[in-house]
Amino acid sequence: MKSNDRLYKISLSVTGILIAVGFAFLTHVRLDSPVFLEHYIDMNVTGDSWHSNFNMPTSLQYITNADDERVVIWVEFADYPGLQLQASENAFDVFARTGVEQSFDEQRGRHFGQYSVREVYLEIRDLPDLDEGEELHLTEATVTFSDSSTETVDIGELTISTEEATDSPLQFVYSSSTGSGQNEVIYSAEENLSLLAVDSTNFEAFSDAVHIDINGMDYQEDSEHNIQAGEQLSIVTKREFSEGDSQFAYFSILPQLTVSTENGDEHTVRLAQAIEMEPDYSFTNIYRYLRSREDM
């Protein structure tokens, strides 16, 4: 009997220790406030569409505690406080007005253990008067939650560029993408061309996370490419998850091709398909990311 009592007391002690350790761990991993990811997003407006009938959907992602019942109901960019937009964590609220069909999950965000990854859908409805070639850079946002609390957060860089529609010696032929993060865009050259550059405002921020091949050759190793009239130019981009900061940033990049004719005239063309990458979400990866930021 004494032996059974001793075993019972030991089991109670072990259970108590496990509960205490578990409670301490849950307290340790809990966030004091939501953490917004760095976003590097290119949005390009061509022609006169930035003056009238303009709308441009995009989104911001953040990490919060799984039991956080608040949602973001408003976003204002500190760089341009008068920018007209709509914000909601319900995709239907935004995309139903832009003609993009989206389903809405009643569960708030995607859950990974104690964390929830949320997405704030934005529709930028109007832009201030911009000259052709001018860019907007949005880097800081004040977000309002459903409990009326607000936070000012760094969001990375959302770049909105404006360009006039011009004739190009590169004609779009085809584009494709795969679930593994590989995109291909094919153009046809109408005359002899030299590819001078493939670049983006945010290229340096994601260069370690994306591999670019031009006509089957690594662009980083061989950036000089000549295309004869009638030949095709193939640009293949592949996501490459890295151990660097870019592993936990969200990218939607529209690189710009710069080509030169035999007469020395230079032309620029935006890729017809964005390079997109979101983090490799899991509880372990999120935990490591938050620890590296010292947000816990």
Image (tube, grey):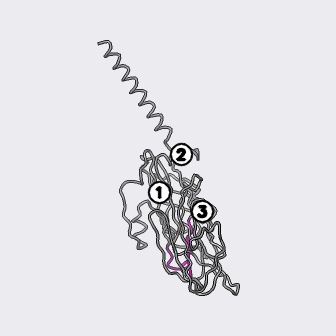
Q: Kindly check if marks 2 and 1 are in contact, taking CB atoms under 8 A apart as contact.
A: no
Labels 3, 2: front one = 2
Say what amino acid the circle numbered 2 marks: Arg
Identified at 48% across, 46% down, the residue is 284
Secondary structure under the numbered disc 2 in the rendered image: helix
The quadrant in which the C terminus is found is top right
Q: What x and y, as percent, mark residue 163?
A: 60, 79
Which quadrant of the view contains residue 270? bottom right
Range of the magenta residues?
A: 41-55
Identified at 52% across, 77% down, the residue is 186
Residue 223 among magenta residues: no
Identified at 52% across, 74% down, the residue is 185
Residue sticking out furthest to the top: 2
Q: Earlier in the sequence, mark 3 or mark 2?
A: 3
Q: Dot 3, crowdedness within 10 Å: few (<14), some or many (≥20)?
A: many
Say what amino acid the circle numbered 1 marks: Val
Residue identified by numbered label 3: 157
Q: What x and y, as percent, mark residue 208?
A: 60, 59
Labels 1, 3: front one = 3
Q: Dot 2, crowdedness within 10 Å: few (<14), some or many (≥20)?
A: few
| Relative to 219, residue 267 above or below | below
Residue identified by numbered label 2: 288
Labels 2, 1: front one = 2
Residue 72 got which mark? 1
